[in-house]
Image (tube, rainbow, N blue to C red):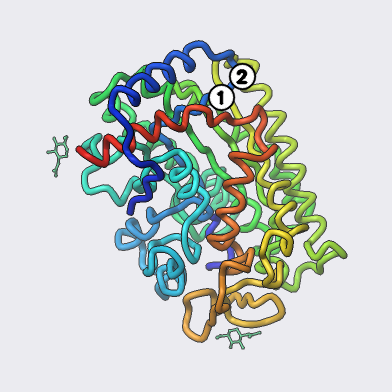
Amino acid sequence: MAKSRKSRVKGFLLESSSPSFCLRISYLCIFLTLMNSPQQATGCYTPIFAFGDSLTDAGNYLELYPHLIPQEKIPHFFLPPNGDTYFHHPTGRCCDGRLMIDFFAEYFGLPHLPTYFGGKNKSSSRNFEYGVNFAVVGSPVLDISFYEQKGMVYPWPYSMKDQLNWFKDLLPILCRSSSCNELKQRALVIFGPFGANDYNNEYFGGTSREEIRSLVPLVAQGLASAELIEAGMETIMVPGMVPDGCLPQPLSSNRDHPTTTGCIGWLNDLMISHNKMLQKELDQVRNHHPHASIIYADYYNSAMQLYHSAQEYGFNGRTFIACCGGGGPYNYNFTAECGDPLTTSCLDPSIFVNWDGAHFTEAANRWMSKAILEGPYTFPRITTSCISSVACDGSQLHTS
Ligand SMILES: *[C@@H]1O[C@H](CO)[C@@H](O)[C@H](O)[C@H]1NC(C)=O
Ligand SMILES: *[C@@H]1O[C@H](CO)[C@@H](O)[C@H](O)[C@H]1NC(C)=O
């Protein structure tokens, strides 16, 4: 059941500055946006739209849960110590604290994005002025029916396509309250990571390596659909997969043994071929839509850098062992996951890379988000030159 990866207020960074200064910078931003060469991303991002799985879900599944077919037990990530580090209570995030999407929002001077299902009124644009998070725990790229037709039980209710449909429902509402063209120009879409659930469900279901590999083109093509661009979005960041072969969850299954790197080699190779194919697909989308700025974010190699140099970056816990879990060599137990009775947490999550066997700690999320926004891991490089204007908008929100 819970074997597939749950695949995954207010932190204004700025003090207020004078309104006229803000205004001027805003004009400059819009001007720069219009002047930009096609492949160049801009730094003026409001709103931010986030899609994904449990690496990005900040509470949608928690909000949806009462309306779903009840499970045998409360999902473990609804329980402490999930959320303890930052929010001091569980929020539906599979983490001790903030996710990468939270750090991205903070970086751009925005509040943490509200979840689509957490907002009080989905027909009102007021909740979503600075962005929306559509991500749901367990979302695969391919439709749930694809897996059901194969005779599999798919344990999570919503797919990538459902999230796109929610977005399409919301867009006209957002457009009612602001200029749609301007909104589309200023928006940043963070589309993923997606795909972990497609592969994990098969992996833990015992599907052969060959058959799992044969999914890669389908998943990569599904991910690179141009739907959001056709809906008018101009800047889209599409992350690749993280090295799932380094996670305590597969390392704890009896299916495979780690190579000398400490990770499961063929599983990481699968992620690499997914990422290669995804980039090829994105090239095609770029060719068809030269005006759009499509940024590939290399989560794989940024995570690898973290794993390789963990000590150097202050992660003195054991790199491949979960902070929170139900015991075993990797502190991961399929029948007792972080939050379940009889599980325990490390004393200091900030020195661990892995939180619960399948997801990063807040500390690792902070490191990763900085690596993505400031490091060499985006193609073309995501530019953040307009951050001050976005922050001005944030300080205006502060006072109104
Ligand atoms: C939600 O917002 C819309 C648009 O502002 C409004 O027409 C509607 O009455 C609101 N619904 C509720 C339940 O408040
Ligand atoms: C995993 O958890 C179950 C249920 O709590 C327990 O019976 C089992 O001994 C645990 N396994 C390990 C390796 O700790």
Residue farthest to the right, as pictured: 260
Indicate the secondary structure of the residue bearing disc 2: loop
Q: Residue 299 appears in which quarter of the rendering? A: top right
Q: Please name the amino acid that badge 1 sits on.
A: Ala
Camera-side residue: 27 or 239?
27
- The residue at 56%/49% (across/down) is 149
Report x, y in % for residue 133: 40, 44
Q: Residue at x 70, y 63 (%)?
A: 206
Q: Is mark 2 within 8 Å of ligand 1?
A: no
Q: From the viewer's perspective, is 146 left or right of 181?
A: right
- Amino acid type at circle 2 is Gln
- Please state which of residues 313 and 52 is positioned toward the viewer in this rendering: 313
Look at the numbered disc 1 and give the secondary structure of its residue. loop
Place of residue 327 in the rendered image (x, y in percent of width and height, measured from the top left): 63, 82
Mark 2, Cα crowd under 10 Å, few <14 / some 14-19 / many 20+, is: some
Residue at (41, 23) in percent of width and height: 184
Callout 1 crowding tier (Cα within 10 Å): few <14, some 14–19, many ≥20? many
Residue 303 image position (x, y, % from top left):
69, 52
Of the pair 250 and 59, the residue shown nearer to us = 59
Q: Where in the image, quadrant-wise, is ligand 1 located?
A: top left
Instruction: Look at mark 2 in the image and give the residue it sits on.
Output: 39
Q: Note whether 110 is above or below 151 in the view shown.
A: above
- Residue in the picture at 58% in, 58% down: 152
* Vertical relation: 21 (above or below) 377: above
- Which corner quadrant holds the C terminus? top left
Q: Is mark 1 within 8 Å of ligand 1?
A: no
User: In the drawing, what numbered circle is on residue 41?
Assistant: 1
210 relative to 386 in the view: left or right: right
Q: Is residue 79 visible?
A: yes
Q: Residue furthest front?
A: 18
